[in-house]
Image (cartoon, rainbow, N blue to C red):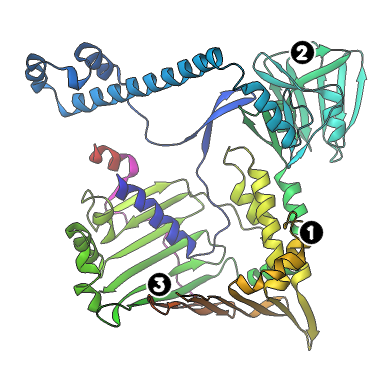
Amino acid sequence: MKKLLSLCVVVAVLAGLVPASASAYDLGIIGGADGPTTIVIASPEEPNNSEGEALYQAAGPWHSWTAEQTQAAESWTEDQWWAYWSAYENDVWSLIDRYDTDLTAWMEVYYPDQWDDDAYLEELKTELGMPYPSGINVSLNGEWMTFGDAAPLAVEGRTMVPFRAFFEAMGAKVTYEKGHITAALESGDVLELDVDSTVLTWNEGDQLHEVDMGLTPYAQNGRVYIPVRFAAEAMGLEVAWNDYLEVAYLTDWDAMAADIDQNFTHLNALLAASMASVDPEQVYQSSETFQLSGTLYGEKENDTAAFTLTGEGLTRGDGRMVSASVKLDLDAGDMADTLFSQLPEDAETVLTDLNGAGLELILNGEEGVCYLRGALMPLLTDGLMDAETWLVLDGFQLSETSDITVGTLLTTLYSGSGYTGMSTNAQETALFLQVLLGDNCFTVKESGGTTTYQVKHSWATLAAQAQKLGLLDEMDLSDLLGLAGDLPEFSFSFTAAVKDGALTQAGLDLRLAVAGTTPVEFTLSMASNGLSGSGTLSVAGRYLGRLDGSWETSSVPTQKTVPTAPGEDEPVITMDDLWEMQW
């Protein structure tokens, strides 16, 4: 099972070696119309376990079995045994849930003054700045929405918001006439609703949509309330619900991406120049080499080991079609007699098997499938697969490459997960990235048709940027710089050049050195000219050892075509097949 999970990690690593727009697995949300409480990742469907429940109810827990019961169970099949244990596990979890519920109820009776969950929750909401700490709140792109005295309500399991206040806060013009409500958005789209109808209609350009909300609008104190989920989704917003905090999180990812990008015009210009150096329809033949070597300082001085990862393949410029192969070579060196000899026997066997092992990949982003095969597959699947059989994985649908910006990258990373607060995470990530590579960090010069970009950082410049963005809380700049003597040595340098709209070169150098009784130094250097690149890294400790790495990548246009699937005569199995073999 663990190796099946490792297989997913390998897929992610391989996909990360090639350019691509985005890919994600769909997540299901279980819960009410406005109150999803559980995120479910799609997986092979669990069979009905009625037989296991019957076996468990008849036999009871294993520890209580009599000799006669044990003898009678000898006729069970393996599937029956596992069905029994699955039912047993469900019963245990049910007991734990019952314990938690009973304990909470008992504490409320016996310690009423020591713990007031409602009071704590209201205090927490107040600290978070919610405008309605005693009830339901709505967040739009990380900001709390206020509706005056018309606070959001819960009706029949749905979060209701005042129609007029909600849409006017979104910039819409709202009209009401004889029970018919209209909200005209700034985009030109219009939402319409009758107060005695459960149907909400809206248009997107020439397309007309409608949805049954399941209940008619709710009227209170002269205001009309509608379910926030339907109102928000009609406007193209993502909706997530936090059941404990009673918060509906609304996210306009396009608006958030645009807002983030306002602070990264220089970095976005470099991303565009990097994309311009590649023809999205052209196929490129690429090769990659990554080498890593380690040296230990100990009883036997300068024990060394090294591994090399080499890869080659074909990639279409838009990243939606890829065919690649990688191979791992491991040289245990002197460490075979020292460090590696202390590993468990099965770990040594795995290291031996990894030496020379390879993996092939075919990614068809247009059809959303990925194929894997190679000598690594038997290791990753506990021998369930051989090296010649392809494993096909679904869920790799890649959209056509559009403009890639910092905003679109971050919103793609955080959107669609179904988890609450992802918009805040995207904004926080952008804020910390702004400290390092925001517009205020760049020096830009023009000369001879070439635009050069440069960023240099020390602790002082990082602290100054962080203070401007409000990330230092109560500590001011002088306080932080007063600690400089206790901080590691730090330097960061980034340079890039653009000519005729295309990236011609880029380089990055980073150094971090920690002094003290056990000094450690980390360095990283990278360089690229658009279609090829190289880099080095090192981690050195005076009394610990040294780790050195280097890599090179290159891509050249080719007339070859990228295969979109294995050959007709090559064996292919699905993940469902693998699950059946596993069990």
Residue 370, percent from left and from top: 41, 53
Residue tagged by mark 1? 262
Are dots 1 and 3 in contact, CB under 8 Å? Answer: no
Residue tagged by mark 3? 312
Please determine whether, in this image, residue 367 is positioned above or below residue 494: above
Where does the N terminus fall, quadrant-wise? top left
Boundaries of the magenta span: 558-576
The residue carrying pointer 2 sits among few (fewer than 14), some (14 to 19) or many (20 or more) residues within 10 Å by Cα, namely some
Residue tagged by mark 2? 197
Foreground label between 1 and 2: 1
| Front residue (pair 542, 354) | 542
The residue carrying pointer 1 sits among few (fewer than 14), some (14 to 19) or many (20 or more) residues within 10 Å by Cα, namely some
Label 3: which secondary element: strand
From the viewer's perspective, is 195 left or right of 583?
Answer: right
Where does the C terminus fall, quadrant-wise? top left
1 or 3: tag closer to the N-terminus: 1
